[in-house]
Amino acid sequence: MSWLEDLDDDDEPEFDEADVRVRPNPKANRPRSKRRPAHADAEIARVLGVDRGRYTVLVDENGPDERTVLGVRARELRKMPIVTGDRARVVGDRTGDGGTLARIVGIEDRTSLLRRSADDTDQVERIIVANADQMLVVVAAADPEPRERLVDRYLVAALDAGIRPLLVVTKTDLADPSSFLEHFEGLDLEVFTSAQDEMPVERIGAALVGHSTVFVGHSGVGKSTLVNVLVPDARRATGHVNVVTGRGRHTSSSTVSLRYHGEGGAGWVIDTPGVRSFGLGHVDPANILRAFTDLDEISKECPRGCTHLPDAPDCAIVEAVAEGRLGDNGASRLDSLQRLLLTFADKSSQRAGSTSPSTLES
């Protein structure tokens, strides 16, 4: 019989504080709390650049005490990526004096995220920039040769992020870009063309006013040169194209935000390192069709699961174009849509039946 069964109904075990076993705390330190300070005194700052764990931020943007401050991330943000363009909450020493460091304790909600993956099968995304609303794709008409498929990938990433794409073609004195530009007919894409020494700076600058524009492009196309013309004090390094390989040499090694001042106002230029590949493993294909608003509306008449590709049965968009209901430009818009959607059809087939990495430079 247990000691509980041996007790009378009126008997109850009595306990006192001595019966409570407490784990000893030899260091006599206070237990850690999960509560974090509210940081009510934090200021909102724009992240201008990131360099080896140090963040250059702009405090009191457009205010009377605007200044750049160097900061580090707080411990609670160690798993959160902080990228150029972020709006950060900053505490600590915000004087910007030499030898001082502020502390980033939070990130404001982002309006957009431009991302890429290592390849089309990689689901791990790399954030390029936050809160941009425009992407300026820079290509050269020659030296190096323009690559339509790479530009397609830039456009897909921009449309997926809800960012307006723009296109600049440099070095038109070396080659006629007409055949290259035909590839993008039907897209709502503003195009600027320039010769090697005659860039349409005023037109490009007018498109930057009031916007945060991220510049992207293959190495050697003149992207950093264009940035230096638009922002004279940028001093971005420029390179040359290898005459043997036809490829540009990487000059910009980090992403940085630079303020643009034009006749019509100000904006932000975000220069990024040149790339030779741009993976789309993170992109949602549904966002591409939404970019073609008229075609998206007609797609509501399509059968469930319609791919909108040339061999898709009973595709309402294909039928509308064939019947001439979308005007003279309908066929080119459908071709542009199908070209972008084919990028994802190829990606899906690679995931299902191939383990080899996709060719991103095609």
Image (cartoon, grey):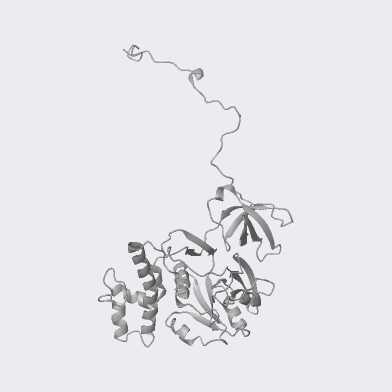
- In the rendered image, residue 178, in percent from the top left (x then y), is placed at 48, 87
Direction from residue 322 to residue 357 in the image, left or right: right
- In the rendered image, residue 359, in percent from the top left (x then y), is placed at 43, 69
Q: Is residue 289 visible?
A: no
Task: Tell me the residue at 40%/79% (across/down).
Answer: 336
- In the rendered image, residue 326, in percent from the top left (x then y), is placed at 35, 84
Q: How many marks?
A: 0
- Farthest residue, direction front: 244
Front residue of 233 and 112: 233
**Could you tell me which quadrant the N terminus lies in?**
top left
- In the rendered image, residue 33, in percent from the top left (x then y), is placed at 55, 39
Q: Is residue 106 visible?
A: yes
Direction from residue 60 to residue 356 in the image, left or right: left
Direction from residue 20 to residue 69 in the image, left or right: right
Front residue of 355 and 70: 355
**Vertical placement of 351 versus 307: above or below?**
above
**Could you tell me which quadrant the C terminus lies in?**
bottom left
Front residue of 185 and 343: 343
Q: Quadrant of residue 32?
A: top right
